Image (cartoon, rainbow, N blue to C red):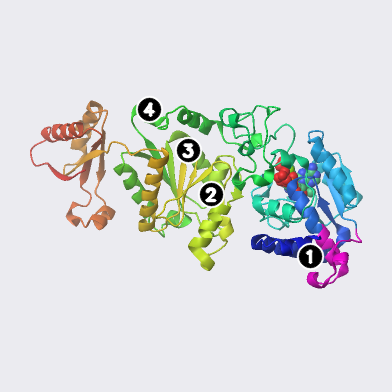
Amino acid sequence: MDIWNSVAECGDKRLQAKFKLSMNVIDRTLSLYGCEEVAFSFNGGKDSTVLLHLLRAGYAVAESQIAPPACTEDVRSRTQHRIRTIYFESPDVFPEIDSFTLDTAKAYDLELELIRLDFKSGLVELQKKRPMKAVFLGTRIGDPNAVGQEQFSPSSAGWPAFMRVNPILDWSYRDVWAFLLACEVPYCSLYDQGYTSIGSIHDTLPNAALCISDSSSDDNSAGTAEGKKLPAPDRKFRPAYLLRDGRLERAGRLKNFASVKVKSRDSLRENGDINGLNGMNGLFAAAILVVGDEILRGDVDDILGMHLSKELYSIGWTVTRRAVLPNDIDAISEEVEHRASDCDIVIMTGGVGTMHCDVTLAGVAKAFGARLAPDEELEEDLRQHYGENCPGDENKMARLPEGITELLHHKDAAVPVIKCRNVYVLSGVTTSELALQWRCLLESAKEKDLFHVQQPFTSIRLRTSLPEVELAGPLARFDSEFPDLTIGCYRESCQFQAIKGGDSRNQGQLIISVVGKEPSRVNSAAKTLANAFPEGVFSEMSKG
Ligand SMILES: Cc1cc2nc3c(=O)[nH]c(=O)nc-3n(C[C@H](O)[C@H](O)[C@H](O)COP(=O)(O)O)c2cc1C
Ligand SMILES: Nc1ncnc2c1ncn2[C@@H]1O[C@H](COP(=O)(O)OP(=O)(O)OP(=O)(O)O)[C@@H](O)[C@H]1O
Ligand SMILES: [Mg+2]
């Protein structure tokens, strides 16, 4: 049966929609450039195998110049133009991939050009010999080199000039397999042996998530994020199309996994210390990262950040950093990388949505060296949450850092909290939404043993109209006398009064805060401080 019929009859509406869009891209490309001026970049991988069959279907229809439903099956299955196909050969490729590529080229009468140079030099030579205006690639969103690409993306600066055409850019892992199975087309045999994404022989293993053997969970012989051993010869794997979680597609690709710094923290947790590095001395450190250009401009207050600070404080956690970041992937990635390694947990909010400027998850992915891959579970959550009213591109919000993401669902929250290692991304945009997500996160954290509520802090705040010069000396002494407490001093600000409904006459008065975990120590420090000055100099504002 031909491709058009197979897809029409498969009953998979999602695949049919993706197929239609891809065929439009192919049709537009062939109309713009003509069959003579385009080439197909084929390497025997599953994505390029999908593309091969889309191109066969597209070429046949383009040549017949008859609309698909009206055109006969006979016309659709034959192409006058052989598809110009370029394959960059490499000594590091799996022999199965190499032979599948060559056999497939023969089977479908592709006009194959073998190139024994690296991609760039090979393309320079090709453009000299027989120029092409566009190249079809099987790149999919989430591939490391898909960053910044659209369905039509001119080649990068410094590369020979041609249009990169990516007809299956927005196909998910599941779509790829739904298509290959529905159309019953041959694919490389490695995919039936548990390989789910194929690179070179040096960096590719079968996917551990497909391992059948019982003992697979207690050794690393298959491809896991950190596993480096070669697969044991007797190990058995399920076929690639049975991988249920498309986020794990590249789990067998060794070099793509995360930074050593984060690994050391994870290994602490793996060894039973789920409290991480700071937890060893009884203090649990959290960072809050709020993303939004509007906050940096001063258009909006960082109310959500303040809310999160209070929540963390109320569960006995110390917030060691609260930062407002621009909607910029590199700025986010840099901050996340630092905070994830020096804090026990990082809580993020802002920049999680369907708009072009929502790049928080892309920044998190970059920080951990992961790619952003489409996530069908979250896609479904969002479809249910937003229905037809999704603002922007709902598929964009459903792309998650691959291999490091866990969705923390809760019965009361429509959208899950996104956990990427020790970074928790909340998507609430109002304080009440955020409060709900925070409550759900705390319950999930307890249930899954992710992090714990700690002994609460006790604090005493004292207001005084004494001048700073009189307080500075004694406060410095108390600070060294009570090293287990945090003794601070700040001036009452207008903003504080506005929020608390305070008295404007107090504006600018000094407030001394004494914070610690042991109530008796906090009380004793406050008393010692008060005794060092004449009676009535301090008024106690609050105790907590
Ligand atoms: C036909 C073709 C065109 C490419 N064009 C570009 C390009 O314009 N810019 C670029 O940075 N890389 C380009 N590349 C390189 C790819 O982005 C990527 O590095 C390559 O597919 C290797 O992926 P891998 O490292 O996952 O095997 C091109 C590769 C091919 C095969
Ligand atoms: N050696 C190569 N020769 C020709 N084209 C290539 C080569 N390597 C990559 N490409 C192009 O880049 C695309 C993306 O490669 P990628 O490895 O992500 O996908 P794939 O190989 O088709 O499938 P898989 O993800 O299972 O490895 C390919 O579909 C193909 O169009
Ligand atoms: Mg590949």
Residue to which mark 2 is pinned = 361
- Mark 4 or mark 1, which has the lower sequence index? 1
Q: Which circle's residue, 3 or 2, is located before the other in the chain?
A: 3
Taking 334 as reference, is 449 left or right? left
What amino acid type is highlighted by mark number 4?
Met
Q: Quadrant of residue 251?
A: top right
Q: Which residue is mark 1?
A: 27
Q: Secondary structure at mark 1?
A: helix
Left-right relation of 241 to 534: right
Q: Amino acid at mark 3?
A: Ala
**Residue 187 coordinates in the image, percent (x, y):** 78, 46
Q: Name the residue tied to disc 3.
A: 340
- Per the rendered image, the range of residues in magenta is 56-81
Along the horizontal axis of the image, is 305 left or right of 81? left
Assign the magenta stretch its main secondary structure. Answer: helix
Q: Is residue 88 visible?
A: no
| Residue 34 image offset from top left, x and y in percent | 86, 63
Q: Which residue is mark 4?
A: 280
Circle 4 packing at 10 Å, graded few (<14), some (14-19), many (20+), is few
Residue at mark 4 to residue at mark 2: CA–CA distance: 30 Å
**Which amino acid type is marked by label 1?**
Asp
Report if residue 142 is visible in the image: yes
Are the residues tagged 1 and 3 within 8 Å (C-beta)? Answer: no
Spatial CA distance of label 3 from label 2 is 14 Å
- Secondary structure, mark 2, is helix
Q: Is residue 401 magenta?
A: no
- How far, Cα to Cα, is label 4 from label 1? 61 Å
Q: N-terminal of the two: label 4 or label 2?
A: 4
